[in-house]
Image: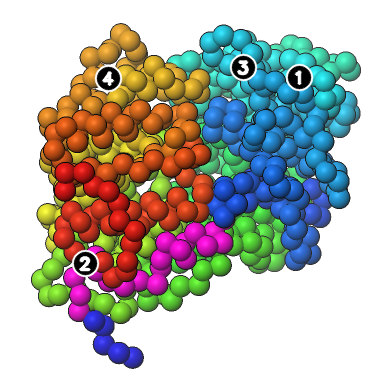
């Protein structure tokens, strides 16, 4: 073995290239079980981000969705629950026209809803009445779309029949096994689903109408998640009434806890059809929960209430679907790309069915995550994951400390996990450390930690990102003069706020980030239109807070280079949010770059654009800090450099 070459941090040559990352990479999700056949969705950057349903049986996979169909719903804009499978027939929402389609095996898709300003999501099959029951979003009127639970008779000339209406939002319509009862979740402005939701239960008569609806759990300050019926017709759900999202069931007209634990069995409902548990039998439930940032798979005996962890190689588990023989999920581990995995419930052996990427990287180039806790404002502790530079071919000159790129996740009500992310390894293998911060407001640490951000967005998240970076500087692990911060969406706001209101960071990258909170409050979609009420304060009553925390109004305090990446079709954070900042920074004479992608929405899905963001951000920092790049990268135009 040759001795490692001595070279400055940031200039290391790496086999983890942007081309490798986007080549054949997939966004896997939306797992469904139908008899002995499995289904999942694949988002394919090399096909312009098109989402395709794939089926698997006995080791053989095949595409179900023909081009140009794109399986994706825009209900709540974020979607989820875009398709279901019933006896081999796929019912799906098509992204272009938002109509529902029916696709029988070997046949072309045919529409089952008419053209019009309607969207559909989170459907279940009503076998006794031969119809779909789903969330319907009606955009035909003025003002906000109207959400309801509707029944679809599969008549291509009908938009469906409304079963339940009156609340601002609905999710998770679930029919009992005998079809006689319907459960669902609802909530109203200004709440988000992780703030407070209500769980409703009603009877369904022979004509399919809903009667006698009554609320059995939840409220303004209790978040209910994922109602599901057991095989014998008992309603289960997740609630955070104790401060932790735990499992419960509705039994003898009472709410009964299943296994109280200081762990999170629930998730923030950003999209439909999220699942953390399912039934293998009447008395066996397979579930997953987060404890200290690590996700665990477990078996719950519903009779004895004994919870038994199941050993897997995964630290993150999503989209769990369960049958009597297996549990299928999207598994993530620190050292390999995420994959669709099936756990045999008898042998507890795991079979990998589909990897998100075929990249096979020598472990010598991989940085292993270090879960850390660090002191932050008000005597509190915050959480993060640190990835030190790692490349078996290089070492830095003696005494040099690496640059650090701090990442703030989106949401902001979300979380990051210690799983393999080729985008992170892209940086660490070049000699740049990564700090992935689960700032106050993140999920996975209980309701109290999640509510640290209540009224404090732009303060708590910024403090935690800054204190995390400063902690690593104090530990002697990174260079305090080369700290940068990056984030997308809400993380983009945290990035811009940190660059504006703190002096910790020397440069940054905003991916479709918010710069003007007032503009966001006035120009965003229904799902998030009152989100800021909880994060900042009611608008317009507290317009003073919105202006005080908006980077665009405090450009005089921002004194370092910034690069912006933006999609021109983004409806969640419109392009004008970035363009106002770019114009102001240009006028101020600061180095600034702006990369606008045609045809992209909120989050980039096209391979060439994902590649461009990775390389473009690296190029930007190389120019700002003056380190040589090991490869040739297409330059980014930087004003005022």
Q: Secondary structure at mark 2?
A: loop
Coordinates of residue 531 in the picture (x, y in percent): 41, 23
In terms of sequence position, does the residue under pointer 3 or pointer 2 come before the other?
A: 3
Label 2 crowd (10 A; few <14 / some 14-19 / many >=20): some
Q: Nearer the viewer, residue 11 or 568?
A: 568
Magenta region, residue range: 6-26
In terms of sequence position, does the residue under pointer 1 or pointer 2 come before the other?
A: 1
In terms of sequence position, does the residue under pointer 1 or pointer 3 come before the other?
A: 3
Coordinates of residue 406 in the picture (x, y in percent): 27, 50
Q: Residue at x 32, y 19 (%)?
A: 518
Question: Which part of the image, by quadrant, shows the N terminus?
Answer: bottom left
Q: Which residue is mark 3?
A: 139
Q: Residue at x 57, y 20 (%)?
A: 169
Q: Nearer the viewer, residue 267 or 233?
A: 267
Label 3 crowd (10 A; few <14 / some 14-19 / many >=20): some
Count of numbered badges drawn on the protein: 4
Q: Which residue is mark 4?
A: 546
Determine whether label 3 and label 2 are within 8 Å by CB: no
From this view, report whether residue 523 is shown above or below residue 142: below
In magenta segment, residue 197: no
Q: Is residue 107 left or right of residue 220?
A: right
Q: CA distance from mark 1 to mark 3?
A: 12 Å
């Amino acid at each position: 073995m040759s001795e490692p070459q001595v070279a400055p941090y940031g200039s290391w040559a790496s086999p983890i290239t942007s081309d490798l990352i986007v080549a054949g990479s997939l966004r896997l999700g939306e797992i469904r079980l139908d008899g002995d056949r499995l289904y999942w969705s694949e988002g394919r950057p090399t096909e312009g981000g098109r989402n395709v349903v794939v089926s698997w049986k006995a080791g053989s996979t095949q595409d179900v969705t023909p081009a140009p169909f794109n399986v994706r719903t825009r209900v709540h804009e974020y979607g989820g629950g875009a398709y279901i499978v019933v006896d081999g027939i796929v019912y799906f929402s098509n992204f272009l026209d938002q109509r529902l389609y029916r696709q029988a095996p070997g046949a072309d898709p045919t529409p089952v809803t008419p053209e019009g300003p309607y969207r559909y999501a989170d459907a279940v099959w009503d076998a006794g009445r031969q119809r779909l029951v789903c969330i319907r979003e009606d955009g035909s009127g003025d003002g906000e779309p109207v959400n309801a639970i509707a029944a679809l008779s599969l008549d291509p000339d009908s938009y469906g029949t409304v079963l339940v209406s009156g609340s601002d939002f609905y999710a998770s319509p679930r029919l009992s096994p005998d079809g006689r009862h319907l459960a669902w979740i609802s909530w109203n402005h200004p709440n988000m689903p992780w703030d407070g939701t209500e769980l409703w239960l009603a009877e369904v008569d022979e004509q399919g109408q809903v009667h006698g609806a009554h609320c059995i759990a939840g409220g303004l300050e209790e978040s209910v998640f994922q109602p599901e019926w057991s095989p014998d017709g008992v309603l289960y759900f997740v609630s955070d009434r104790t401060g932790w999202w735990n499992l419960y069931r509705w039994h003898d007209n009472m709410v009964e806890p299943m296994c109280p634990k200081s762990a999170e069995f629930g998730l923030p409902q950003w999209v439909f059809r999220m699942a953390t548990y399912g039934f293998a039998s009447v008395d066996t439930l397979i579930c997953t929960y987060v404890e200290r940032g690590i996700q665990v798979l477990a078996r719950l005996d519903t009779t004895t209430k004994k919870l038994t962890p199941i050993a897997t190689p995964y630290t993150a588990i999503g989209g769990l679907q369960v049958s009597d023989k297996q549990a299928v999920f999207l598994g993530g581990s620190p050292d390999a790309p995420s994959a669709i995995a099936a756990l045999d419930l008898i042998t507890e052996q795991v079979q990998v069915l589909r990897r998100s990427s075929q990249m096979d990287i020598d472990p010598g180039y991989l940085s292993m995550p270090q879960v850390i806790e660090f002191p932050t404002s008000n005597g509190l502790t915050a959480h993060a994951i640190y990835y030190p530079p790692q490349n078996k071919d290089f070492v830095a000159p003696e005494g040099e400390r690496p640059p650090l790129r701090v990442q703030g996740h989106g949401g902001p009500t979300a979380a990051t996990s210690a799983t393999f992310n080729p985008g992170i390894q892209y940086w660490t293998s070049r000699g740049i450390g990564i700090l992935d911060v689960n700032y106050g407001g993140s999920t996975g640490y209980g309701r109290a930690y999640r509510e640290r951000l209540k009224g404090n967005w732009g303060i708590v998240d910024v403090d935690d990102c800054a204190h995390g970076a400063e902690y690593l500087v104090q530990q002697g692990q990174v260079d305090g003069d080369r700290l940068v911060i990056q984030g997308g969406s809400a993380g983009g706001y945290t990035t811009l706020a940190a660059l504006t209101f703190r002096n910790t960071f020397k440069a940054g990258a905003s991916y479709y980030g918010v710069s003007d909170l007032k503009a966001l409050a006035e120009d965003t979609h229904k799902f998030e239109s009152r989100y800021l009420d909880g994060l900042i304060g009611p608008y317009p009553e507290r317009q003073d807070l919105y202006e005080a925390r908006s980077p665009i109004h405090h450009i005089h305090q921002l004194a370092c280079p910034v690069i912006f990446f933006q999609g021109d079709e983004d409806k969640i954070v419109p392009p004008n949010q970035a363009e106002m900042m770019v114009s102001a920074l240009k006028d101020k004479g600061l180095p600034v770059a702006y990369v606008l992608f045609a045809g992209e929405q909120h989050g980039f899905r096209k391979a060439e654009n994902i590649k461009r963001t990775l390389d473009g951000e690296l190029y930007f920092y190389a120019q700002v800090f003056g380190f040589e790049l090991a490869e040739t990268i297409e330059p980014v135009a930087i004003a005022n450099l």
